[in-house]
Structure formats: structure tokens, C-alpha cells
Amino acid sequence: MDIISEWGFVFLTLAVIFGFYMTWGIGANDVANAMGTSVGSGAITVKQAIIIAAVFEFAGAFIAGGAVTKTIRKGIIDPSSITGSPELLVYGMLAALLAAAIWLMVASTRGWPVSTTHTIVGAIVGFAAVGIGMDAVNWAKIGGIVASWIVSPLVGGFFALLLMISIRKLILNTENPFRSAQKWAPVYVFLVGWIVSLVTMFKGLKHLKLELSIIESFIAATVVGLIVAAIGKMLVNKVVVDDDADKDYHYASVEKVFTPLMIFTACAMAFAHGSNDVANGIGPLAAVVSIVESGGEVAQKASLPLWILFLGGAGIVVGLATMGYKVMQTIGTKITELTPTRGYAATLAAAITVVVASKTGLPVSTTQIAVGCVMGVGLARGVGALDLRVVGNIVVSWLITLPAGAFLAAAFFFLFKAIFS
């Protein structure tokens, strides 16, 4: 307890710095995944992606990011054995934040789309194993995360493949693809509004103490979907056939119809992501703040001051603006060639997978879902449409994320323990 009172201000300062650094990493890597399909398909520019993310990621993090968060992330560790030594949990959370942030920076500079959730989980496991004991780690949970390396891309890729097949059947392979695109576009826009509203209601609004039943969530999502569809129909009706462009590429005008749809998906996914994944960066920060302000009490839950949400939202935006372009390039251009139709299918498939996962409890990663969806869209044109070398590099980066986070966190834990104890 004496250590907490003596070094409390230093711990808080370090937690704020490391928390901002971690959310910077989330912006540079995770948010870039959400924006990558929109940029890679040519629907929006990198600058527009940054503006959209700045508004909607920040809004999602600040409005629906959570009034209360589990500071011990997802039951990964049991802190009950160290209630008499709360400083160990402070060292561990600081180590986890710094380790995860550094790994995300390394991955982002390389253009690897890794999972921020798995990074922070690996980091927490690393410090818990060496600082508390192997028994404190929930190994069954870790097994589920390892399983998600296979589950996430497969489920996302499957949905993306189905959507791409539907677009081909209903639009691209018809007598008049442009007219078919205008006819079906409102339905596809409705799906965007409906699915992403469900994502937010299932995972985001409980933090605002607005608990909706499943039926109420579906009704609200349907209303949002119809409103978005009406706006989409107005925008799509303004698109005119470009005969010159169609001579070079038969479906050029069809792709123009899908460009407004991609803007909707970019905005919606940014909001949903901001409301869901900001906890990866601010959960450990909230834990440190809670322990220091309570004078050393270790609690499973901690109230989340608004300034922490503000910090998380700001860090995410700065990360995307400064380093996000590298991961956006990997997702948007290097795995397979994307057009607005393909980008739309990949983004919506990712949203569907998140909804399914959030209601069934499947241990999935937003990042791996996004990559799987882009691969699924590519597979619709055959394996030759994928750059398997890039895919291989991505898979390797996934495999080393959890142990890399764990190793770094263990090292930083001993460093902080040596400095402050």
C-alpha cells in the first residue's frame, strides 16, 4: 500500500502516457483495418478515411465506449491472490499497455494487420504468468483465442463469398447491370444500416445503461436500416451512366453506384469499432486509475471517467492519421484487387461476422475477420486473385502476436518492479 501512496502520481502519469500510446496503436492498426477496404476500393481517399474515422471512431469511443469496463480484461487473469500487493497489478497493467503498444507499433510499421485484442491479452498473460503465477491465468480462455485464429477468417470469408456471389447473380450477370445496381442498391444499403446498428446495440449501448431486448434491438436496427436505405436510394439515383468509362471496364458505372454504399459502411464500421475496441487500450488504464485512486483496492470492475474515454478516442484518431496508411495499403490493395462492389462485400461481411460472434460468444478478432473477408472476396474470382505471399506474412504475424505481447510484458513487469519496489 505504501508503494501506491508514494508513487501514485507517477503511476497515473505513466498509465496516461502508455494508454494514449496503446490507443495510438489501435488507430494505426485496428482502425486501419476497418478503413482499408473503403480506401483500397477507391471509394474514399486516405484523407477522407482519416476524417471519417476522426468523427465516427471518436464518437463511438466517447458516446458508447462504456461507463463501466472490466479492468481485468475478459477474465484472462484472477487477481484475487494479489489483493495484498496491489502494486503488482499496477506494474502488470503498465507493462501490458507498454508491451502491447510497442508490438502494435512494430506491426503497423511493417503493414501487418494484427489483432489489438490478442496483443493486450498476450501482454496481460505474460505479466500474470511471471508476476502472479501460472495458476492465475485462465488457460481455457487462451485456448479459445488460439481457436479464433482459424474461426475468424473462415467465418468472415464465407460471408464475403456469399455476398459477392449475390452481387454477381443479382447485378453483374444481368442484361443491364447498371439498372440492376440501382434497383438492388437500397437493399444492400439497408443491410449496412441494419447490421451495423445491431453491432452497436448488442455491444455498445449496454455501457449507456440502455439495455434493449433482442426484439427491441431488431426493431430499432430495422428503423435505422430503412432510414439509411432511403438516403442511399437518393444518392444512388443521382449516379449517371459513364459510357466512356464503361468502354474500358464494363462495370465502371456499376462500381460508381456502389461508391456511396462504401461511404456508409466506412462511417458505420468506424462508429461500431470505436465503441467496441477502445476498451483494449483504456481497460488496463482504468485498472491503474482505480487502484491508485482507491489507495490500493483491487476490484474486478472500475468506473470509467469521461476523460479516459476522451483520451482513448483521441489516441485512436492520431494513430490512424500518422501510421494507419501502411495497414490500409495491406488490407486494401496487397491481398487482392478491390473495387467498390468487392470492398462493400468484404466490409459488410465483417460486420455480419461481428454480430454473429457477439451473440454466440465466438472468440473472434475484428482484424482477422477483416482479412478473411477480403480473402473471401478475392476467392470469388479464384485463388489466383490472392497474393498468397502477403497472406502468409499476415498469418505469421498473427501467430507471433500473443507470445510477442507476453514476452515484452514480462520483461517490462520485472523492470517496473525493480524500479519502484
Image: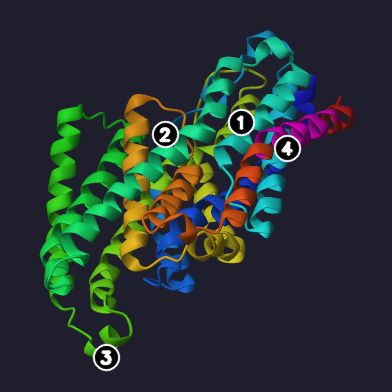
Task: Report the front residue among 266 and 172.
Answer: 172
Residue at mark 4 to residue at mark 3: CA–CA distance: 52 Å
- The vertical placement of 206 against 299, above or below, is below
> Dominant secondary structure of the magenta stretch?
helix
Which of the two labelled residues, at mark 1 and mark 2, occupies the earlier sequence position? 2
Q: Amino acid at mark 2?
A: Ala
State which mark lies toward you, 3 or 1.
3
Circle 3 residues within 10 Å: few <14, some 14–19, many ≥20: few
Q: Amino acid at mark 4?
A: Ala
Which of the two labelled residues, at mark 3 and mark 1, occupies the earlier sequence position? 1
In magenta stretch: residue 403? yes
Asked if one can make out residue 189 in the rendered structure from this viewpoint, the answer is: no
**Residue wearing tag 3:** 244
Q: Amino acid at mark 1?
A: Val
Give the structural element (helix, strand or loop) at label 4.
helix
Tell me the quarter of the image containing the C terminus: top right
What are the residue bounds of the magenta stretch?
Answer: 401-414
**Residue wearing tag 1:** 121
